[in-house]
Image (cartoon, rainbow, N blue to C red):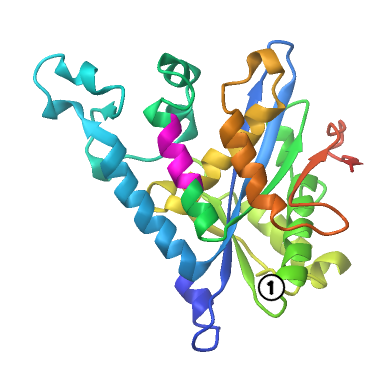
Amino acid sequence: MITTVLALLKPGEFALVIFIDESYQKDSGGVWHYALAGFAVNEFRYRAIQAASYQLVRQFFDVQANYVGDSWREALTHKIIVEKSHDDIELKASDLLKASSLRRFGEENSPHHRLVTEILGNVRRCRGTSFGVLVNPDDPQQVKSCSDGCPPVYTRLIEMIARWMQDEHPGQNISLVLDTEHNGVNLPLSRSIADFLYRSRAGQNMRNVFPAPFWIDSQSMAGAQVADLIAHILMNSMMPETERKPLKILTETVYGLSHRWQTSSGGTITRLRKLTADGGSSRRH
């Protein structure tokens, strides 16, 4: 899919891609916290992120079958022990950033924390920029409702991306890359995003944004897995302080990826007010 975009470019040019995922959780008070987030990067530099992630999986993970008896337990201070082979491992926030794993050896000493730190460090070295829209909906499924057109969280995210492209990468193009849902494409959402970019006055002015999202399999694309981590970290930062996982350092790193780009209107992570019953929202500046 990315190759298709590259075919439209002049020799020596590279497209930008932004990998996007979502993360949501309800706190003890019944409030939902939702983050639609990810990172943008030059397609050429993304190859370095993909290669580094491949190597990090082999560095941090080990297969339990390689150990005799319970000897694998002794390796837990520096290895993440799994039962599957390295080729089947997917970097998922729900597995890597469990509160129990982070607190077992201390936040920074956990191999899970060190792995995610390395991953985000690679994004930074490859000049990746984080994006995110945070909101407290009545229900997370409400966020992606396309009954009134493109969902507000997606229009807001696309607006930030388009403004960033205009300021930082004029004349270049960027493609939205979304993770498939239950191994399938969300056709209503895909169509609503395309309609917004094709038919609305605001969308038609966003000429730098490719007018339809690409859907990918997260298990084979490190970018989607990194977006999952970023979305989860931002969502966790929204939780009540007493219910947050110990991810302060990772949260600062994610925000740091966006704060390297600043305009008078702000950075690339924003907060929407709680969605209304009809799916609309108002913005918090």
Magenta run includes residue 133:
no
Tell me which secondary structure the magenta stretch mostly adopts.
Answer: helix
Give the quadrant of residue 194: bottom right
State the residue position of label 1: 169
Question: Which residue occupies 72% across, 69% down?
Answer: 168
- Residue 206 location in percent, x, y? 78, 70
Left or right of 238, for residue 38: left
Left or right of 280, for residue 176: left
Question: Which residue occupies 57% across, 63% down?
Answer: 17
The residue stretch that appears in magenta: 113-120
Q: Residues within 10 Å of mark 1 (few under 14, many from 20)?
A: some
User: Circle 1 sits in a helix, a strand or a loop, which is it?
Assistant: loop
268 or 252: nearer the viewer = 252
- Residue 215 location in percent, x, y? 52, 56
- Residue 188 location in percent, x, y? 66, 51
222 or 75: nearer the viewer = 75
Question: Which residue occupies 50% across, 85% down?
Answer: 12
**Is residue 1 something that shows in the picture?**
no
- Residue 165 location in percent, x, y? 72, 68
Q: Residue furthest left?
A: 68
Question: Which residue occupies 68% across, 11% down?
Answer: 28
Give the quadrant of residue 199: bottom right
Left or right of 234, for residue 102: left
Left or right of 149, for residue 13: left
